[in-house]
Amino acid sequence: MTKRARWILALVLLLAVAAAVVALRRGSTQTAASAARAASAPTPAIELAAGDVATAAMAELSSLLQVSGGLKASRSALVKAKVAAELTELTVREGDRVAAGQLIGRLDATEFRWRLRQAEDQAAAAQAQLDIAKRTLANNQALVAQGFISRNALDTSESSAAGAAASLQAARAAAELARKAVADSEVRAPIAGLVAQRLAQPGERVPVDGRIVEIVDLSRIELEAAVAPEDVLGLRIGQAARVQVDGLAEELPARVLRINPAAAAGTRSVMAYIELAPGAAAAGLRQGLFARATIELQRRSALVVPASALRVDQARPQLLVVEGGLARQRAVRTGARGEVLIDGRPEAAVEILEGVAPGATVLRGTVGTLRDGTPVTLARVATATAAAPAAAGPAASAAR
C-alpha cells in the first residue's frame, strides 16, 4: 500500500469516529430531554376501590383473651354396678337416648333373691320369738301381782322380750338390705341424655363400682380451657365470650361459667369453664371436640383503625393518610390490638394513641406501597370512606 493510500484510509477512519461521537451526543441529548419531559409530566392519580380506605374513629375497644380446649357436657354420669354380679342384659348402645330412671340393663339377681328370702324367713322367726316373749311377759306380770313368782323372774321375762324385739329389728334390717341388693341388680339411667360409651357387655361379671355405660347430657355444653397464670387475674365469672369450633362456620356465643380456684401442679395454669349458649346442642356439637374461645376481659373507648392499614416496614409504625387528594405518610404510636365489627363481621383493628386525628381517611394495605405525596382519587368511594369503625358502630375488640 502506498503512502497516499494509507493517509486516505486514516482520514476515512477519523471521519467515521467523529460521526459516531456526534450520533452518541445527539442520542444522549434526546434521552435527557425525554427524561426531563417525563419528570415534568404530572403523576397520574391512583383510583381507590371502596375497600381500600377506612376512617379513624372512636370505638369501644375490648381487651380479649384467647384460650382453647375441648368441649364437654355440663352433666354426665358413669353408670356403675352397685353389686358384684354377672351382667345379663344391656339394652342400650352408643348414641341411644335415655330418660332419667329408665331401665337399661340387669345384673344376675338370683343370689340376692335367695338372700332376701332368707332374711325374710329370719324376720318371721324373730317375730314369732317376740310374740312368745310378749305372752310370757304378760303371764309373769299377772303372777307377780298374785305373788306366785319373784320379781327377778319378771325382770328376766322383760329382758327376753326386749331381746326378741331387737332380734326382730335386726332381721327386718337384714331383709331390707337384701331387698335393696335385689333392686340394685337393675341398671337404671341416673340422668337423661345420650349414651356415650358402652363399657361392659352381657355375660361379663361386673365388680362393685364396675363401669357399665357413660351418659352425657348435651343440652348444656362447656369448653374446658387452661388459662395461663398471667391471664387469670383479668378473668371473671360472667364475662362474654365467642367460641369457634373446628368444622363449624359460625362462632357461638358463650360466657365464663366457672373458674377453678386451684392451679395445676405442673403447668400452674388454671382451668376455666366457658358455657356455650343453649342453642349449641342444635349445632350438632359433641363432647371432646376442639374449640377456641375469645373472652372479652374489659371494654373502653379508643381511637382505632383497621390493622391492615398499619405499615411496619419502617422504624416506626406508619399510616397512609389521604390529605388534599394526596397520600401522606404519618408516623403513629399504637396501643392495643383487636377487632372492629364492620357490616356485622369482625375485622382486626389497632388502637392509635397519637399521630392521626379522629375522622382521618387512611389507606388499607390492599393499595400496596405508595410514595409520600402520591395523588389518589376517592371518586368511587365517596359514600364508603367510613368503611372502618365509624360504619361498624362502637364495637371493637383488642386481643392480648
Image (cartoon, rainbow, N blue to C red):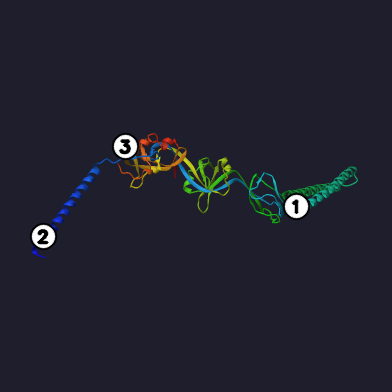
Q: How many marks?
A: 3
Q: In which quarter of the view is residue 36 placed?
A: top left
Q: Residue at x 48, y 48 (%)?
A: 229
> x%, y% of residue 143?
90, 44
> x%, y% of residue 209?
67, 53
Q: Which residue is mark 1?
A: 109
Q: Nearer the viewer, residue 137 or 341?
A: 341
Q: What is the spatial separation of the Cα atoms under label 1 and label 3, in whole angstroms?
A: 91 Å
Which callout, 1 or 3, points at the residue further toward the start of the chain? 1
301 vs 210, left or right, is left
Q: Is residue 151 visible?
A: no
325 vs 191, left or right, is left
> x%, y% of residue 326?
31, 39
| Mark number, residue 96 | none
248 vs 380: above or below:
below
Q: Residue at x 23, y 43 (%)?
A: 37
Residue type indicated by callout 1: Ala
Q: What is the spatial separation of the Cα atoms under label 2 and label 3, in whole angstroms?
A: 67 Å
Q: Nearer the viewer, mark 2 or mark 3?
A: 2
Q: Residue furthest bottom?
A: 1
Q: Secondary structure at mark 1?
A: loop
Q: Secondary structure at mark 2?
A: helix
Q: Which residue is mark 2?
A: 8
Residue type indicated by callout 2: Ile
207 vs 12, left or right, is right
Q: For the C terminus, give its image quadrant.
A: top left
| Mark number, residue 325 | 3
